[in-house]
Image: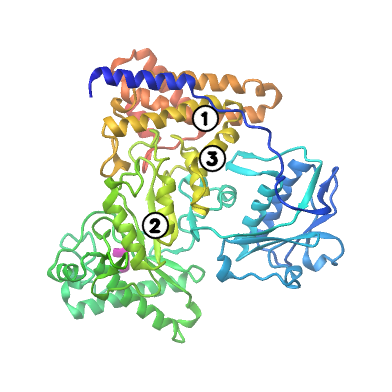
């Protein structure tokens, strides 16, 4: 590429920064496109005839659901509904039934866990009443949030950010018959700021990373060695040569294999006894690229076409032992529909399957299979997440996903990645990849979706990670959502009057990403560890113009400082969270050719904002103090 062409492109990018602008959205209105029940109103002129009815022994989830419903319903209409238990409701009057109430049981409404799963739901109008029904209580809770979206256009972006229509004086009862089931039964929070807030988790319809997992000796993952390390029979044949991974064939020694199975079973049995209320456990390789290359493992790899075959067959045997124990008098009290999950990760990522062009499927090599109860968690850590999994540069990872999808037959967990683990504060722009990656995961019948970002940052994330939380939560429920529409809605709600100014920065970032992918080798193997503090990715003029845009954004919200101080501070913090990222790049990339005075000012502002917002991490497992030790 010639220097002249590079200059032309950069000039174009800068001009785009000055011309891109978002449009102010019309004020929200309640849903006017649905049929209504004639003459019936959930709220009218500050009054309601409705009660919310909950089961006698309503769970905390149901109670949270009705509390949140009333909170936001009141904000929209000035009305809240009395909440009563079904034992206290005499049947007179209009109601919204939430969960498995006696009112629901007395109807002819049909629903089942098989249809809805744990999180799916129905919203049904019968006469002048409404029923919110989940496959389990989580589904009933999610139904209440869906109903808020239908009634008052409610949507939730982050812990301090949501939208709804206010000032509704008359809200009709809609004639509803809604059934909604998520594309992934389990959708896991990606950032620590979501995972550590029940409010955020519930409203984004996500779950904590380890919620249903049994811990084995205080380890939920990368725990394979934990299964055997305390066994009195432990033997060198149970390990690879370096003792950094297990050997799942015990080096071909049948007697040692039997002892190794016994040791793992005893460990798992104890964990099952100690944790009777969870139904999944991982038996997962250690977090390195090592493996056993003994003759027995190599022979099995040759027979089945992938090293992962050694883990599958080992866990099939362990799974059989556990299920047999569940049938005994000792095991019956602890029996459950247990899922034993292994990692298809690093050396074990490829599946023992081969594509059959006549069937269009990946078929198991030499008849290998995963028994019922054995699940694979595919973790394509080296994929280029700047590009979707269907991009030709990701062919290996696309093949792995499709082959595991066909082999696992629904017993598939998926672990994606969408942050840069060496640079939490540098934008990692994979927004053009999410929709296709999630769609392919759903096509392969993934049961569980975890898209890892800054899980150890519990307070504030930057680099547009809050936007990722929102977009990914929506796509995790429905992969057919339009991500661009979601992005538009987020900016209007999260930044308010400053949305156009902040959108300039974000759109510019996406232009830069496309340019960098084309001309600066942004991408390739393991992009989550790409060195992002390289000035070739971040033209100084662009970063400095972003600094101007932040100031313009703050000017846009200035009138709120007097009229609505709390809202002003909320928008201000949202702007500052993204400004942190730009300050970081200016210091890391341009300290060598910028005045000491200006760099010191950037450092000071970064620290001031990071302290204010509670930033704790520099990169994965590294405290922010390590960055300050380098800077100051």
Residue 605's place in the image compared with 47, above or below, is: above
In the rendered image, the residue lying farthest to the front is: 358
Residue 489, how many percent across, how many down? 57, 38
Residue 629's place in the image compared with 420, above or below, is: above
Q: Nearer the viewer, residue 616 or 451?
A: 451
Res 9 quadrant in image: top left
In the rendered image, the residue lying farthest to the left is: 295
Depth check, mark 1 against mark 2: the one in front is 2
Residue 572, how many percent across, how many down? 57, 27
Residue 116's place in the image compared with 563, above or below, is: below
Helix, strand or loop for disc 2: strand
The label number, if any, that marks residue 485 in the structure image: 3
The secondary structure that dominates the magenta segment is: helix
Q: Nearer the viewer, residue 283 or 96?
A: 96
Residue 56 in sight from this viewpoint = yes
Whichever of labels 1 and 2 marks the residue nearer the N terminus, that label is 2
The label number, if any, that marks residue 481 in the structure image: none
Quarter of the picture containing the N terminus is top left
Residue 516's place in the image compared with 286, above or below, is: above
Spatial CA distance of label 2 from label 3 is: 25 Å
Res 556 quadrant in image: top right
Whichever of labels 1 and 3 marks the residue nearer the N terminus, that label is 3
Disc 1 target residue: 612
Magenta run includes residue 225? yes
């Amino acid at each position: 590429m010639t220097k002249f062409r590079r200059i032309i492109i950069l000039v174009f990018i800068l001009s785009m920064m000055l011309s891109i602008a978002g449009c102010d959205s019309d004020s929200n209105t309640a849903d006017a496109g649905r049929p209504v029940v004639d003459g019936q109103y959930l709220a009218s002129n500050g009054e309601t005839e409705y009660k919310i009815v909950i089961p006698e022994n309503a769970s905390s989830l149901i109670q949270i659901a009705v509390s949140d419903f009333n909170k936001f319903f009141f904000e929209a209409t000035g009305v809240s509904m009395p909440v009563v238990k079904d034992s206290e409701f005499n049947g007179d009057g209009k109601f919204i039934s939430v969960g498995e109430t006696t009112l629901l049981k007395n109807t002819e409404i049909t629903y089942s866990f098989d249809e809805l799963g744990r999180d799916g739901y129905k919203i049904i109008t019968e006469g002048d009443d409404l029923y919110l029904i989940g496959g389990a209580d989580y589904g009933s809770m999610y139904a209440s949030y869906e109903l808020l979206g239908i009634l008052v256009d409610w949507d939730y972006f982050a812990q301090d950010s949501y939208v709804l229509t206010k000032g509704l004086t008359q809200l009709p009862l809609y004639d509803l018959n809604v059934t909604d089931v998520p594309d992934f039964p389990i959708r896991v929070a990606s950032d620590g700021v979501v995972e550590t807030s029940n409010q955020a988790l519930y409203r984004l319809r996500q779950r904590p990373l380890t919620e249903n997992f049994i811990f084995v000796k205080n380890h939920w993952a990368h725990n394979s060695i934990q299964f055997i390390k305390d066994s009195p029979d432990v033997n060198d044949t149970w390990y690879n040569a370096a003792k950094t991974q297990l050997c799942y064939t015990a080096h071909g020694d049948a007697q040692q294999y039997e002892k190794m199975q016994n040791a793992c079973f005893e460990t798992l049995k104890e964990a099952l006894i100690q944790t009777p209320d969870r139904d999944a456990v991982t038996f997962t390789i250690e977090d390195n690229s090592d493996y056993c290359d003994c003759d027995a493992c190599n022979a099995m790899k040759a027979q089945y076409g992938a090293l992962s075959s050694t883990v599958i067959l080992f866990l099939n045997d362990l799974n059989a032992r556990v299920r047999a124990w569940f049938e005994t008098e000792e095991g019956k009290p602890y029996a459950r529909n247990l899922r034993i999950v292994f990692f298809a990760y690093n050396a074990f990522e490829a599946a023992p399957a081969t594509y059959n062009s006549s069937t269009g499927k990946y078929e198991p090599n030499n008849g290998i299979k995963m028994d019922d109860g054995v699940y694979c968690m595919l973790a394509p850590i080296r994929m280029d997440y700047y590009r979707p999994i269907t991009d030709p540069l990701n062919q290996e990872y696309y093949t792995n996903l499709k082959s595991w999808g066909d082999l696992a037959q629904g017993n598939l967990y998926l672990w994606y990645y969408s942050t840069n683990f060496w640079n939490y504060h540098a934008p990692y722009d994979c927004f053009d990849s999410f929709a296709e990656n999630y769609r392919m995961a759903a096509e392969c019948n993934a049961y569980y979706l975890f898209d890892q970002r800054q899980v150890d940052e519990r307070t504030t994330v930057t680099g547009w990670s809050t936007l990722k939380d929102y977009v990914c939560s929506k796509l995790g429920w429905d992969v057919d959502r339009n991500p661009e529409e979601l992005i538009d809605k987020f900016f209007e709600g999260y930044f308010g009057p400053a949305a156009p100014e902040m959108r300039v920065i974000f759109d510019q970032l996406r232009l830069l990403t496309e340019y960098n992918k084309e001309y600066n080798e942004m991408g390739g193997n393991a992009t989550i560890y790409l060195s992002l503090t390289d000035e070739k990715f971040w033209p100084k003029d662009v970063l400095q113009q972003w600094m101007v845009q932040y100031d313009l954004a703050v000017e846009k919200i200035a009138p709120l400082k007097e009229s609505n101080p709390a809202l002003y501070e909320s928008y201000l913090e949202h702007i500052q969270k993204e400004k942190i990222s730009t300050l970081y790049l200016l210091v890391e990339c341009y300290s060598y050719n910028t005045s000491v005075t200006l760099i010191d000012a950037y450092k000071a502002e970064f620290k001031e904002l990071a302290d204010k917002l509670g930033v704790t991490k520099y990169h994965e497992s590294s405290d922010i103090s390590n960055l300050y030790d380098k800077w100051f």
